[in-house]
Amino acid sequence: MLSSLGMSSAKPEAEGFSNVDSSQDQRHFVDYLDLVRSRKGVREGKELSFALLQLKPGDLALDVGCGTGDDVILLAKIVGEKGRAIGIDSSEVMISEAKKRAAKSSNTLNAEFHLGSVYQLDFPDETFNGVIADRVFLHLEEPRKALGEIIRVAKKDGKGRIVTHDPDWDSLVIDSEFKEVTRKIVKTASDWLKNGTAGRRMYGMFKEAGLADVTVNGGAVIFTDYEPSFQHLELEKASKAAVAKGVISEQEQERWVADLQRKGEQGRFLASFTTFRVAGTRM
Ligand SMILES: C[S@@+](CC[C@H](N)C(=O)[O-])C[C@H]1O[C@@H](n2cnc3c(N)ncnc32)[C@H](O)[C@@H]1O
C-alpha cells in the first residue's frame, strides 16, 4: 500500500498513486499492483466486491481507477458479450498497460479503457448498472466530489450499485519491539496519502450522499509471511520516509527493520490493517 506513496527509492515521491505518470519509476506502480493482486486475501476480497455489484449479463459496469485493468477483464466476463465493462484511470501508464493486457486476454471485446479522472467522468447521467472503485479513494483529495460524480453516472431507481474498497492506513499494526517508532512510521505513511483514512470514512459518505441499502464489511487483513508482506506494506520505504521527515533517526530505522527481519527469520512476523468494503444503491 505504501507503494501508493510512490516510495520506490529512498527519496519518496509524495504524489504516488495520485499521479503515477509524474513518477520517475512508473513501472514500479504496475509491478506493485501485480504483487498486491497475487495475494490470496486480495483476490477473495475482489470477488466479494464483484458480488456486491450484483451485475447481470447485459449490464454496463465501470471500474474507476482501474489500474492495470485486470478487474475490468473479469467484469467483462460477468456482464458477457451483450454487456460492457469500462475502465477509466487518470494514468496513461495504467491505461496503456490495461489495453495491452486486454489485447492478450481472450473474450475481451466488451472491455474498454479510457484515460480520465473520477472528478469528471465522461459518461452521461444514469449510465451504469455497477460502478466500482477499488483502493482509489485513499488517493483522492476530494472524495465527496468523486463520490458525487460516481453516483451521477450510476443508474437511478435501484438499478445502479456502487462499491468502494479501501484500507484505513491508520489501522496498520506491526508487532515490533519498538512501539513508539512503529507509531511514528505508521503516522508518516498514513499522512502521506491524500486520504489515508478513507477506509473508515466511506460508509458515512455513502449514507450522507443518500444511497440506499448501504452495507459495510471487511475486517483485519493479517500478514504473517514476512518477505511478501514487507514488500506489500513497503515497510522499509515507509520507515525511510519517517527518517526523511525527521520523526525517527537513521539508527532507529535500522534497528526497527532489523527487528522485523529477525522476527521474519524466526517465523513470527505479524502485521495487520483493516480494510472496508462499502456498497450502496442509487435510488
Ligand atoms: C492503488 S491503484 C488501484 C488500481 C486497481 N483499482 C486495483 O485494484 O488494482 C489506484 C488507481 O487509481 C488511479 N487514480 C488515482 N487518482 C485518480 C483519479 N483522480 N481519477 C482516476 N483514477 C485515479 C491511479 O492511477 C491508480 O491506477
Image: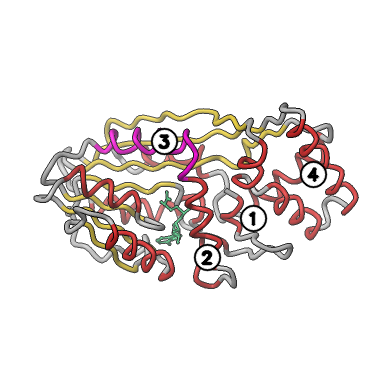
Residue 91 in the image: state x and y as whole percent. Answer: 43, 67
- Among the two numbered marks 4 and 2 on one chain, the one whose residue lies closer to the N terminus: 2
Of the two numbered discs 3 and 2 in the rendering, the one whose residue sits closer to the viewer: 2
- Residue to which mark 3 is pinned: 277
Name which quarter of the figure residue 174 lies in.
Answer: top right
- Among the two numbered marks 1 and 2 on one chain, the one whose residue lies closer to the N terminus: 2
| Count of numbered tags | 4
Q: Secondary structure at mark 4?
A: helix
- What amino acid is at disc 2? Arg
Viewer-closest of 55 and 196: 55
Confirm or reject: label 2 Cβ below 8 Å from ligand 1: no
Q: Residue furthest right?
A: 251
Separation of marks 1 and 4 at Cα, in angstroms:
20 Å
Separation of marks 3 and 1 at Cα, in angstroms:
22 Å
Labelled disc at residue 257: 4
- Residue to which mark 1 is pinned: 192
Q: Residue at x 48, y 52 (%)?
A: 33
Q: Residue at x 77, y 39 (%)?
A: 261
Labelled disc at residue 27: 2
Residue 68 in the image: state x and y as whole percent. Answer: 40, 58
Give the main secondary structure, helix, strand or loop, of the magenta stretch. Answer: helix
Callout 4–callout 3 Cβ contact below 8 Å:
no
- Among the two numbered marks 4 and 3 on one chain, the one whose residue lies closer to the N terminus: 4
Range shown magenta:
37-53
- What amino acid is at disc 1? Trp
- What amino acid is at disc 4? Val
Considering only vertical position in the picture, is 176 above or below 19?
A: above
Callout 3–callout 1 Cβ contact below 8 Å:
no
Confirm or reject: label 4 Cβ below 8 Å from ligand 1: no
Q: Secondary structure at mark 1?
A: helix
